[in-house]
Image (cartoon, rainbow, N blue to C red):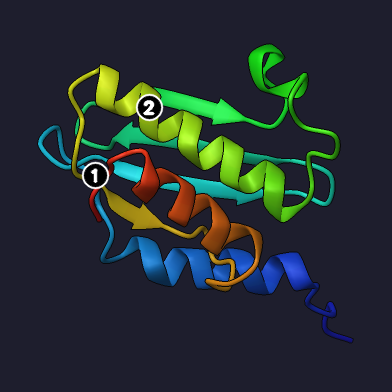
């Protein structure tokens, strides 16, 4: 009997399909989003050198004080604004968005909107 595929298996397969086309360069790094049930994470990654340039999450000490619950839209917006501010401070103003296999709505959309409001273009 074949193993039943889980929701996460399907998400990982979607992410693999997206990653075929989405690739971060030093001029235009990749903004990668991961969301768990209780938190949300964002990283700006240069895939050429394989390094994380900027990151923010709902678990960061600076953000945790202002976030009541790390797994809602308000927290995602705050994390998006913070990753946008940190990227702009490092001179990164344009990124390609990697939704990580998640649907583009809810928390993922709020994080993207927060990053755009901080000045990132994608």
Q: Is residue 13 left or right of residue 16?
A: right
Q: Is residue 73 above or below residue 56?
A: below
Residue 9: % across, % down: 70, 68
Residue 85: % across, % down: 38, 27
Residue at 38 percent across and 46 percent down: it is 117
Residue at 73 percent across and 65 percent down: it is 8
The number of discs equals 2
Q: Residues within 10 Å of mark 2 (few under 14, many from 20)?
A: many
Question: Mark 2 — residue?
Answer: 85
Question: Mark 1 — residue?
Answer: 24
What residue occupies the far bottom of the structure in this picture?
1
Q: Is residue 69 left or right of residue 101?
A: right
> Which sits earlier in the primary sequence, circle 2 or circle 1?
1
Q: Nearer the viewer, residue 75 or 35?
A: 75
Q: Is residue 120 above or below residue 122?
A: above
Asked whether residue 113 is in view, the answer is: yes
Residue 57: assigned label: none
Assess whether mark 1 and mark 2 are in contact (beta carbons under 8 angstroms). Answer: no
Residue 82: % across, % down: 49, 29
Residue at 47 percent across and 37 percent down: it is 81
Q: Nearer the viewer, residue 99 or 74?
A: 74
Residue 111: % across, % down: 53, 50
Asked whether residue 51 is in view, the answer is: no
What residue occupies the far top of the structure in this picture?
61
Q: Of tags 2 and 1, which is closer to the observer? A: 2
**Distance of mark 2 from mark 1, alpha carbons?**
19 Å
State the SS at label 2: helix
What residue occupies the far right of the structure in this picture?
1
């Amino acid at each position: 009997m074949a193993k039943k595929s889980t929701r996460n298996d399907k998400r990982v397969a979607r992410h693999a399909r997206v990653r075929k086309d989405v690739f971060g360069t030093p001029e235009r790094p990749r903004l990668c989003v991961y969301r768990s049930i209780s938190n949300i994470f964002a990283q700006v990654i240069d895939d050429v050198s394989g390094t994380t340039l900027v990151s923010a999450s709902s678990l960061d000490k600076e953000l945790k004080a202002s976030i009541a619950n790390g797994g809602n839209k308000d927290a995602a917006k705050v994390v998006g604004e913070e990753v946008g501010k940190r990227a702009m401070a490092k001179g990164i103003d344009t990124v390609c968005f990697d939704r990580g296999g998640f649907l583009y709505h809810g928390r993922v959309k709020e994080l993207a909107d927060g990053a755009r409001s901080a000045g990132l273009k994608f």
